[in-house]
Amino acid sequence: MKKILIGMSMLAALALTGCTKKTDAKVLKIGVIQLVEHPALDSSYKGFVDGLAEAGFVDGKNIVIDYQNAQGEQANCVTIANKLVNDKDDLILAIATPAAQAVANLTTEIPILVTAVTDPQSANLVKSNEKPDTNVSGTSDLTPVNAQISLLKKIVPNAKTVGLMYCSSEQNSVFQIEIAKKSCAENGLEFVEGSVSNSNEIQQVTQSLVGKVDAIYIPTDNMLAAGMATVAMVANEAKLPVIVGEGGMVASGGLCTYGINYYELGKQTATQAVDILKNGANPKDMPIQYLEKCDFTKNENTEKALGITLPDNL
């Protein structure tokens, strides 16, 4: 009996001193707010999840991912952002500029990573892209706009006027269009702006460019990416080549692009998340990152519909 009592006393002492083995590790909560469903943003999210899994952070195992999609509505972005902040998630991923702005306006405490945001600095998400100095960091989807306008010039060498289509309420699109305007001037091209404020205007604005322009350029614009099939329907019938900002828009009917890979962008964002969750890195000290590699993609069906053959040297 004496030996038993001694053994029990030792176990109690071990428990009191914290020497018992801990088996319950904390399950981290990651909230995700995505602006709208379209191939580019969907690929970013998939790349993010896969990148986390490759680093040992598996949804349903040692992390819980709360994925929310705003379906293109700014009001939904605010509602979702409030939910994620109130849930006190360990990290929030915001996909696309309006989604990022919605959540960044509500918390300065929770680490926020953004992706598919063209210029976080001009979107007032960070103090500078080189040194954010806020609770926000992430990856930019700034595409090679100049290279894309040059691509348009190669495909339509006799083009004189280009239609620049974009959503006027998306800061990321306005930023890219300003670059496109300068690039058009450098390439000896005139331009006509075709801005939309909601998805119901896409067909009408595309039709308004027919007969006025020789080709259309659309940057990485979320509203137009989601409505790309409508643009293609009108433009292809009018034999207007549409050069776009990313590969998902090509798959949806655009002619071609020289752009970034959004899946890889999402994976790159995941490496930043791992640095925060595992190593305690602070977003304020993490520069905005960019993808250096770009891919050329084309839509062969669109090529046939337009009755053109793209040069082999593209």
Image (cartoon, rainbow, N blue to C red):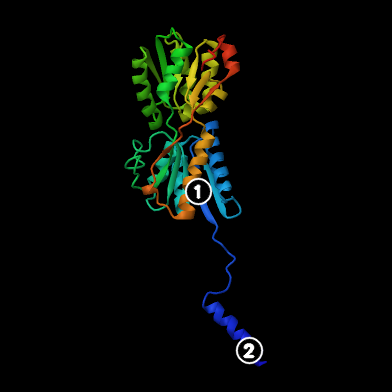
- Residue 95's place in the image compared with 304, above or below, is below
- Residue 69's place in the image compared with 192, above or below, is below
Q: Residues within 10 Å of mark 2 (few under 14, many from 20)?
A: few
Q: Residue furthest left?
A: 127
Residue 299, image x, y percentages: 57, 19
Q: Nearer the viewer, residue 41 or 308?
A: 308
Q: Nearer the viewer, residue 12 or 210?
A: 12
Snapshot quadrant of residue 159: top left
Left-right relation of 46 to 177 = right
* Residue type highlighted by circle 1: Gly
Residue 30, image x, y percentages: 51, 50
**Residue visible at 56% across and 62% down in the picture:** 25
**Alpha carbon of mark 2 to alpha carbon of mark 1: how far?**
50 Å
Is residue 88 at least partly visible in the picture? no
Q: Which residue is mark 2?
A: 5
Q: Nearer the viewer, residue 209 or 93?
A: 93
Q: Residue furthest front?
A: 313
**Residue visible at 58% across and 83% down in the picture:** 10
Q: Which residue is mark 1?
A: 31
- Answer with mark 2 or mark 1, whichever residue precedes in sequence: 2
Residue 298, image x, y percentages: 55, 20
Determine the secondary structure under disc 2: helix
Report the disc number at residue 247: none
* Residue type highlighted by circle 2: Leu
- Residue 81's place in the image compared with 142, above or below, is below
Is residue 286 at least partly visible in the picture? yes
Name the quadrant of the N terminus.
Answer: bottom right
Closest to the camera, between mark 2 and mark 1, is: 2
Left-right relation of 248 to 118 = right
